[in-house]
Every structure is written in structure tokens, then in C-alpha cells.
Image (cartoon, rainbow, N blue to C red):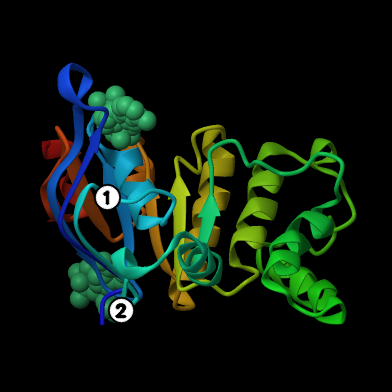
Amino acid sequence: QPIIRLEHISKVYGSGNTEVRALSDVNLTVEAGEYCSIMGPSGSGKSTAMNVIGCLDRPTSGSYYLDGTDVAGLDDTELAHVRNRKIGFVFQQFHLLPQLTAIENVMLPMVYAGVPVRERQERAAEALTRVGLENRMNNRPNQLSGGQQQRVAIARAIVNRPVLLLADEPTGALDSHTTQEVMNIFQELNASGITVVMVTHEPEVARLTRRVVWFRDGQVIHANMAPSDIAQV
Ligand code: ADP
Ligand code: ADP
């Protein structure tokens, strides 16, 4: 079964004169193990789609099946539970807590998930090792480079073993060298079985994924583009 199945999804903000149709009849399937990027002009619905996929927002109409679960049938508590269990999030601006060390930041999602204390430390260290930060675990964010901070954020995103990793412009705040470093980590995580979907406006980033989904005016205009074809759009 697919990890993501969006069927006839629409999202309308506001009403009457101020109504904005952010998504209009979007159909999209992402299979387990895929590595996709979402591209498209500003205002084309990418963030709205990511919010729906990430169970942060509900569509106005249509169905969403996340790893087989019909999300529309869940109440807010159940939705939050599914989100915490199944999805890891990475953002452009890292969103680390400045007063906590790297390992403390990575342990936080396990606190919310109710992982026993003695297990948290071990799993956080494991996640930080996976992103190559085994020697930076006790540093605070302001003692780390941008790329290192994003790697802490990635460790935090995977520590609850999500089936889906969602990243919104994960390299938007990084220089090209660090971008490459962070993309290597996404590539390794994908190779280990995590489904990865990222929004990016950088063709050189999208080219490192396996599939490009292109949005325009709230619709998917290319659902399955080869990354090598980006230049032709
Ligand atoms: P290529 O893209 O190199 O021409 P294939 O499409 O046959 O070759 O895929 C090669 C490998 O990549 C296969 O193991 C396949 O399962 C995997 N693969 C194909 N498409 C994707 C995708 N969208 N995301 C992740 N892995 C993929
Ligand atoms: P993108 O991420 O591709 O830039 P968005 O999903 O942010 O696109 O926006 C799609 C459309 O929905 C735009 O016209 C945007 O102005 C509108 N929109 C997004 N969020 C809201 C909101 N909370 N309230 C009203 N309109 C919104």
C-alpha cells in the first residue's frame, strides 16, 4: 500500500470574496521507499499540500490515506497521534530549541511519544550518529554550523522511526557545500527505507531526488517527472 494517497483533494481558504482555492482536485500517490521533490512557483499550493500530507491541516474535500489510514476519519487527538508516530518533519529554519544541547533536542519527540527515559538517550545518540554528529551531541545549536544544525533537526525527525520524512525547503538556508552534505543524509535515509518528500525551489536539489511532482495553480501538472527533465519545464 502507498505511504501517501491523495484523492481529489481540494483546500479552500476563506469564503465569499476572500475565497482562495489553494488546492484543486489533487491526486497524488507516493509509494513506500520513494524519494520525491515537490516543485512549482510560489503560491502554487506546495505548502498547503505539505500541510495536508503532514496531517497539520485538513483538506476541504477529498480523501487522504496515510500508510493505509483514512485520515479524514480521525479526530484531532488521533490525527496528532498518527502524525507523531508516522511522520518526521524538517524545516528550512531548523527550529531547534537554543537552550538545549543537540542530544536534548533529539530526545524531545521521544518525551512526547512516551519512550522510557533510559531508551531516549540511546536512541537519540543512535540518530545523531546516523547523521554524522556523534562528536557534537553535547553542543548547543549556536555552537554548530548551519549544516550541523540541520543534521540535528534531521536526527530529531527520524528518532521516532517515521515511515515518512517531510522536508520543507530543507536546504534553503544552507550554502552549496552544506546542501550537498544534507542531501547525502536524505539519500542515505531513503536508501535505508524511509520515504522522503521534500519541497524545494532549487533544481540542483530536486535533481538529487528520484521523482519530481510539479504544482501549478493548486494542481499537480506533472506527477512523475524524471529529475533530469526539470530544465525543460
Ligand atoms: P533509473 O532511475 O536508474 O533508470 P529505475 O527507475 O529502474 O532506474 O530504478 C532504479 C532503482 O531505484 C530501483 O531499485 C527502484 O526501486 C528505485 N527507484 C525508482 N524510482 C524511485 C523513486 N521515485 N524513489 C526511490 N527509489 C526509486
Ligand atoms: P506555495 O507553497 O506553493 O507557495 P501555498 O500553499 O503557500 O503555495 O499557497 C497556495 C495559495 O493559497 C496561495 O494563493 C496562498 O496565498 C494561499 N494561502 C496559503 N495559506 C493560506 C491561508 N492560511 N489563508 C489564506 N490563503 C492562504
Residue visible at 30% across and 64% down? 72
Q: Position of residue 139 (x, y in %)?
A: 88, 49
Q: Position of residue 5 (x, y in %)?
A: 23, 67
Give the camera-side residue of 52 and 166.
52
Residue visible at 75% across and 76% down? 123
Q: Which residue is mark 2?
A: 68
Of the numbered discs 1 and 2, the one sitting upstream in the chain is 1
Q: Secondary structure at mark 2?
A: loop
Image position of 12 with respect to 160: above or below: above
Give the camera-side residue of 36 and 100.
100
Figure quadrant of residue 7? bottom left
Q: Position of residue 147 (x, y in %)?
A: 65, 43
Some atom of ligand 1 lies within 8 Å of the CB belonging to the residue at label 2: no
- Counting other residues with Cα less than 10 Å from the Cα at mark 1, is it few (<14), some (14-19), or many (20 or more)? many
Image position of 180 with respect to 76: above or below: above
Q: Which residue is mark 1?
A: 59
Q: Position of residue 69 (x, y in %)?
A: 33, 76
Q: Amino acid at mark 1?
A: Pro
- Counting other residues with Cα less than 10 Å from the Cα at mark 2, is it few (<14), some (14-19), or many (20 or more)? few
Residue 121 bears which disc, if any?
none
Figure quadrant of residue 134? bottom right
